Image: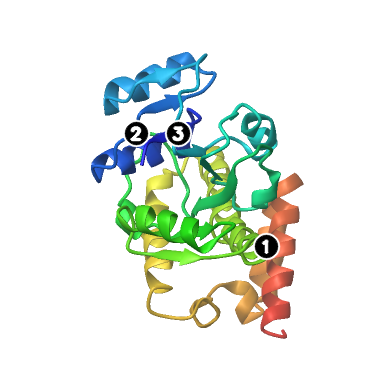
Amino acid sequence: MQTVIIGSGNVAYHLAKAFTQNNIPLIQIFGRNEEELKKISEELDIPYSTKDLTDADLYIICVSDQSVETVSKLITKKDCLVAHTSGSLPKEILIGEYRKSSFYPLQTFSKSKDLHYSKIPLFIETENDEDQKTLTDLASKISENVMKSDHEKRKYIHMTAVFACNFVNHLFSRAKEISDAQEIPFDYFLPLIDETVKKIHEIEPKSAQTGPAVRNDTRVLELHEQLLKDESLEIYKTMNHSIKKMYEL
């Protein structure tokens, strides 16, 4: 199957890398950012273009949600399969006379961070059984965890990922702001962060909860509130309220 990846960002890079590492040929990577496309092309030995989108059997669109519809209109070939990689958009967002699908990898992607692609869940949705098998077979060459998922389910998968990843990372950023302000090396907290994540591989998150809120330690909670201000104070209060409500404290 002749395949083109459209995009030059984190998802496009890692998907292209996953394909090449598993000996799945890509005939082109296409996008607007020539500098980033050239880097990917040189690293992974994939032809690139910013102007001419080559004919292919499969196009995988790896761009921001806001750009998916516009980019999908660039594909004028009729007898082909087109997939986007968004967790929140329906396949119907794709505009063109081709077969529509989604190819959603559940992971956080940064170009500077290597990943074990075989462990990344991939969720597939298509318009017919034949295309479902085609994309499932393709995804199975990359990942051990390939599942069928319609848009309704995928919306909840994506939202859960925001809680489990994006919100948690934001809390890390806020924590580092506090430690930096007090000249406390953030490295001190990495063993705690590692153990927190490791623990939920073995224990239900609700059972693993510790800290002053779950103990209803009002003295510590009030002390911390006195030390904080602005957004961090609001986050602290909101999180502790949620913890108390979960444990009915």
Question: How many numbered marks, from 0 up?
Answer: 3
Badge 3 crowding class, 10 Å Cα cut-off, few under 14, some 14 to 19, many 20 or more, is many
Q: Nearer the viewer, mark 2 or mark 1?
A: 2
Say if residue 89 shows up in the picture.
no
Judging by the rendered image, the residue that carries numbered circle 1 is: 223
Q: CA distance from mark 2 to mark 1?
A: 57 Å
Q: As drawn, is 24 to the left or to the right of 61? A: left
User: With 134 as the anchor, is 142 left or right in this view?
Assistant: left
| Left or right, residue 168 beside residue 156 | left
| Residue type, mark 2 in image | Leu
Q: Residue furthest bottom?
A: 248
Q: Position of residue 114 (x, y in %)?
A: 31, 42
- The reply to whether the C-beta atoms of the residues labelled 2 and 3 are less than 8 Å apart is yes
47 or 80, which is in the foreground?
80
Q: Which residue is mark 3?
A: 5
SS assignment at label 2: loop
State the image quarter where residue 69 is shown.
top right
Q: Quick one: label 1, few (<14), some, or many (20+) residues within 10 Å? A: few
Front residue of 200/56: it is 56
Q: Residues within 10 Å of mark 2 (few under 14, many from 20)?
A: many
Which mark is drawn over residue 26? 2
